Amino acid sequence: MYDPRSMKAQEFIDHQEILESLAYADAHKTDDALIGSILDKARLRKGLSHREASVLLACELEDRNREIDELARQIKKDFYGDRIVMFAPLYLSNYCVNGCLYCPYHAKNKHIARKKLTQDEIRAEVIALQDMGHKRLALEAGEDPLHNPLEYILESIRTIYSIQHKNGAIRRVNVNIAATTVEDYRKLKEAGIGTYILFQETYDQESYEKLHPTGPKSNYAYHTEAHDRAMQGGIDDVGLGVLFGLESYRYEFAGLLMHAEHLEAVFGVGPHTISVPRVCPADDIDPDAFDNGISDDIFAKVVACIRVAVPYTGMIVSTRESQKSRERVLELGISQISGGSRTSVGGYAEEEPPEDNSAQFDVSDRRSLDEVVRWLMELGYVPSFCTACYREGRTGDRFMSLCKSGQIQNCCLPNALMTLKEYLTDYAAPETRAVGDRVIAQQLDGIPNEKVKQIVTERLERIAHGERDFRF
Ligand code: SF4
Ligand code: SF4
């Protein structure tokens, strides 16, 4: 029985409701009047239901598909301006007791190098990341109560926040670890994490159980209800995601939006972010073994439809995607990207020898952070290293109400420009700095409030003279 307010996974992600939504979408995929009315609703920027958004995703009318793209671009522009938030993943350990069929860290993979960073190695990684210019990390670790107990994760977070090296600082640590208990989530909250991110992988329970034959992750309900427990433990920014390619993308899309509706219905706050990874090659993993892979065109449409359906939710794309694919989805809705990523354990401090493969997936976009920053600016974007909301306590419903009233816009651009200036001053190559200074000068004009513009101008000058960490 479908009930977005239920705390049972099978009721808020109701299989029958998804099938009926997909059948409804199929029946209306050329229904011009209905699609037009859904687009009118989406133009109000208050979001769409999973069923309405599923109709847009199924839409086969070319003109309407163009309208969906245009609306996604406009919503992206209205909510996020030209800003793109930068982050990097940090792999702590690839020990894992689970049997996920799509991931090389699965317990039965005997030819992958197993590694777990010591606190000293974490220090070396963080210094290498700081020297690139990163301020925001996403911690990644396999599930292994013996090798990676929660205490290890907590200790690692303390280590990361404690490192001050030159002008570097990691100011926000997001965490992507296995589903756990309310008590553990409370401890993560106390350790000062930003967003707790957990990918569902697939919302289809039958597929989920086949893809997770062994280990604690095989429990569909426990995994699907994890974000609820995180919220109950006091973490009010949670991130969702599916791994496109495992199941039918339309099923996942509907499930993802139902999950967002559930969080909104129960906690009054939707997901902080949605990630859209696609299955990609890795040791022991052939993406062709999964027959639901999606083309670049469909991937772009999924991004556009998510953007239209949940305008307030940040969207993340990783270096799994190529430069070309990232370029396309940036304008349709992506608001955060990783840059200069290493997906191996310990890969930032030292280049990993090829025979010692510990990577979770093959990185498609291999450019350095500086190259990514320059590329973004040349495309007209403003790379942002901002972490202000988290540090000012603007999380959960406080954050969402500022978003919904549009007030957050008064903070984002000034913060983006000031953190970009820090990056340019401390880490950028000369040609990147030259492009960046031009971008900052142009974007300053886009700050509507004269008083704010004046404050930012003064602060940019102070950053050039060595001061750091201003924020609105
Ligand atoms: S996806 Fe996560 S839980 Fe599954 S094998 Fe990989 S690291 Fe382990
Ligand atoms: S001000 Fe808040 S919402 Fe805006 S970029 Fe910074 S952290 Fe994100």
Image (tube, grey):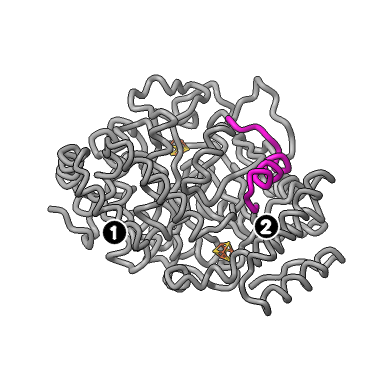
Q: Quadrant of the C terminus?
A: bottom right
Mark 2 residue crowding within 10 angstroms, few (<14) / some (14–19) / many (20+): many
Q: CA separation, marks 2 and 1? A: 40 Å
Is 365 contained in the magenta span?
yes
Q: Residue 373, how many percent across, how many down?
A: 69, 45
The answer to whether residue 237 is left or right of residue 348 is left
Q: Residue furthest bottom?
A: 451
Quarter of the figure with residue 449: bottom right
Quarter of the figure with residue 121: top right
Which residue does the numbered mark 1 point to in the structure image?
A: 41
Q: Residue furthest front?
A: 63
The answer to whether residue 191 is left or right of residue 211 is right
- Residue at 48% in and 54% down: 76
Describe the element under mark 1 as helix, strand or loop. Answer: helix
Tell me the magenta residue range.
364-382
- Residue at 58% in and 73% down: 392
Q: Residue 305, how many percent across, how many down?
A: 36, 46
Dot label at residue 60 = none
Quarter of the figure with residue 364: top right
- Residue at 33% in and 23% down: 291
Which residue does the numbered mark 2 point to in the structure image?
A: 170
Q: Residue furthest left?
A: 1
The amino acid at mark 2 is: Ile
The amino acid at mark 1 is: Lys
Quick check: is the Cβ at mark 1 less than 8 Å away from ligand 2? no
Can residue 219 be seen from the camera position used here? no
From the viewer's side, name the closer residue of 333 and 174: 333
| As drawn, 316 above or below 389 | above
Describe the element under mark 2 as helix, strand or loop. Answer: loop
Q: Residue 350, how many percent across, how many down?
A: 74, 35
| As drawn, 255 above or below 157 | above
Q: Residue 170, how many percent across, how many down?
A: 67, 57
